[in-house]
Amino acid sequence: MVALVLLSLAHGAGSGVPAWPAGLAAWGAGVALWPRLDRNQQRFAIVLCALGGVALVAALARGIPPAWAGLLTQNTPLLGMLAAVSFLQLVGIAGDEEARPLPRGRRALWQTVAGVHVVGAVINISSVFIVVERLARSGRLTQRQAIAVARGFLAAALWSPFFAAMAVALTYAPGARLADVAFAGVPLAAAVLWLAVRTLPQPAAGEPAEFTGFPMHPSALWLPLLLTVVVGAGHFLLPGWSSLAIISGAALAIGALAVLVASGPADGVERIGNHVTHRLPAMAGELMLFLAAGVFATGLQAVLQLDPLALPFTRFGPLQAAVVLAVMIAFAGIGVHSVVTIVLASAWLSPLLPDPTLLAMMFLASWGIGLAINPMAGVHLALQGRFGLSAHGLARANLRYCVASYLAAVAWFFVVAWWRGVL
């Protein structure tokens, strides 16, 4: 995994290192970590690889040579970034919040949703665990609290450069620029956060009427702000670096420096070593998901050169984005991961030469909104496994929120299309 991070960073920095060595490192890690996957993860990876393999064989049988390099390079920069960003989890956000009393009421709800959104945009799902563990320590974690935290976290997928969703969107929307996509995603995320609070279910029988939230302190925001500045400066000062390489480099540097300063050189190095030997291998599920998706995407792209799927429209604008997004969210509702529908949509829509920013925004919306009603979403399964809450119940409770957020996304697509000149 360390080799994957370093080789991906070297390739993205324009050093002349090709992409395939990082791909070899990724597959090597995938093979080594295969036993750590549960049966469902193994089965899903096998199905995706099998579908991709069948498509590759079909392309070869018809005389079309597939882009074999895609098996090693399709999602390698994405995986390198995800592994690099994981080092930000060494920093944490808890601080003196552990000793603070839990706030209550409407303000506490807003504080919790906004706080887990901003911090989760950087340290990912770790922010969810930090918040819900603290809430559960003062009593049973309620479904309402879990829903609020999950909604705030998932909405960060609409703009955060440090989310897997952004890496996937930039990978499968060729030509999309991080700055443009993040800029377009922030207003939609703000609207979705407002809907997350406004549509929150009423307390269930036996739950307290007042919402008990997390005591998020402004000092916890230094990391997101610093990373925003560093990534922005990186795009200006390092024009030869890819967006994913800049994010990876910033995450590695800030994560390592922060832990060394906070813990001292000896303890800091030990914590980094523990992260390498324990946390990185724990990413086995994500690793195999994206490796298998890369095989699937390579096969799909090859077979679509032969028999392009019929398109019900001749251009890709906001109305078409709305239709495709509705289908993607519907698939999410029955448990299909957004990675799969993004790969399919990217290959299917490519003949239309869609505007990359609008396409990337549709992908981000399918992730940030669709996963809220996906019972197989990682955040729902984690809450089910740790606190006994029903993943299907959490997903069902988000249906109204999902519909409202979808309508907000559709309206925003028209604004983005006007901005991009494709209205």
Image: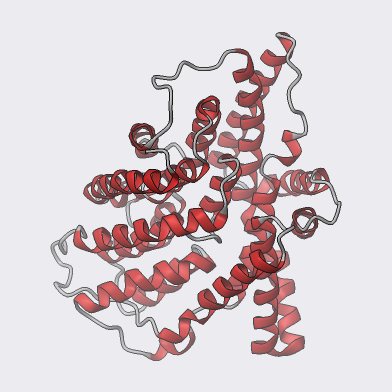
Instruction: Residue 227 in the image: state x and y as whole percent.
Output: 58, 73
Is 238 situated above or below 397?
Answer: below
When asked about the image quadrant of residue 333, the answer is: top left
Q: Which residue lies at the image location 46% right of the left edge and 52% below the top edge? A: 378
Q: Which residue lies at the image location 22% right of the left edge and 80% below the top edge? A: 104
Instruction: Residue 53 in the image: state x and y as whole percent.
Output: 67, 23
Instruction: Residue 124 in the image: state x and y as whole percent.
Output: 51, 63
Is 386 situated above or below 76?
Answer: below
On the rendered structure, is 203 left or right of 407? left
The answer to whether residue 388 is seen in the rendering is no
Give the color scheme: rainbow, by chain, secondary structure or one colour: secondary structure
- In which quadrant is the C terminus drawn? top left
On the rendered structure, is 223 left or right of 189? right
- In which quadrant is the N terminus drawn? bottom right
Instruction: Residue 218 in the image: state x and y as whole percent.
Output: 41, 85
Is 315 situated above or below 306?
Answer: below
Q: Which residue lies at the image location 61% right of the left edge and 46% below the top edge? A: 37
Residue that lies at the very extreme toward the top in this rendered image: 62
When asked about the image quadrant of residue 131, the answer is: bottom left
The answer to whether residue 407 is seen in the rendering is yes
Residue that lies at the very extreme toward the right in this rendered image: 16
